[in-house]
Amino acid sequence: MDIDISGARIFFTFPFDFPILGKLSISETMLVSWIVMAVITLLCIFLTRDLKVENISKRQALAELIVETADHFVVGNMGERFRYMIPFVAALFATSVVSNLISLIGLRSPTADLSTEAAWAVVVFILITSEKIKAGGIGGYLKGFTQPIPVLTPFNILSELATPISMACRHFGNILSGVVIDTLIYGALAVASSALFGLLPGALGNVLSKVPFLSVGLPAITGVYFDWFSGCMQAFIFSMLTVMYIANAAES
């Protein structure tokens, strides 16, 4: 299989060119992203089945808790006028969390590929820009690049473009570093296990040295941080930056 610049494997390339897309390849990132979307969709269907007004089930109570949390997060940080952003922010957070944690079952996290965060950041950047144009019009938006003095225009443009780049790279860097560190820990413990049990004499040492006993236990402990804590925290940070940037753009 070929390896692209992101490290995601290419599983299949269509043998013909599309008029606009060119050769369409199905990469590991795309495949796992579809799995993430399927998991979230099925979870939403499961949580919202048989909704009732009275005598609600624990499943419905959990669904209502999630909705109320998303409502308080968006409205509390952006204001009542941005209530329409609740589905987008909730979907962004859910996609990020599931993408980050799916590595726990052995799949490569889509967020370990910069193209994933870059796509999210582009969408957020478009929303930020649209809010700025709504607030001051196209003229006001363009004039903002000349503030406080026209000579700073190139730097203001770079600062504007740095917003989506920094959001994407921050999320990507933290997730990829966790994947790399986990891989290094597994590899180091496997080598240590082989060297340690290889000291045993005869066939026993030959057999036991091939089993990575030391890889059991410690990686699970480090995974609590690199997978669970870091994954959830990065999803929260990306969502928080999204709501804050959009809210600030509407006030500019």
Image (cartoon, rainbow, N blue to C red):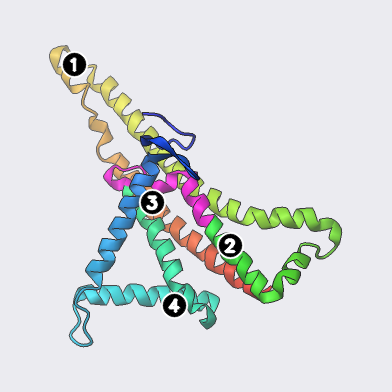
Distance from the alpha carbon under mark 4 to that under mark 2? 24 Å
Q: Residues within 10 Å of mark 2 (few under 14, many from 20)?
A: few
CB contact under 8 Å: marks 3 and 4: no
- Front residue (pair 205, 74): 74
Label 4 or label 2, whichever lies nearer to me, is 2
Q: Residue tagged by mark 1?
A: 206
Q: Residues within 10 Å of mark 3 (few under 14, many from 20)?
A: many
- Amino acid found under the numbered disc labelled 2: Ile
Asked where in the image residue 131 lies, by quadrant, the reply is: bottom right
Highlighted magenta segment, given as a residue range: 103-121
Q: Residues within 10 Å of mark 1 (few under 14, many from 20)?
A: some
- Amino acid found under the numbered disc labelled 1: Asn
- Amino acid found under the numbered disc labelled 4: His
Horizontally, is 157 left or right of 240 in the view?
Answer: right
Label 3 or label 1, whichever lies nearer to me, is 3
- Front residue (pair 225, 110): 110
Q: Residues within 10 Å of mark 4 (few under 14, many from 20)?
A: some
Distance from the alpha carbon under mark 2 to that under mark 3? 24 Å
Does the magenta portion include 120? yes
Which mark identifies residue 126?
Answer: 2
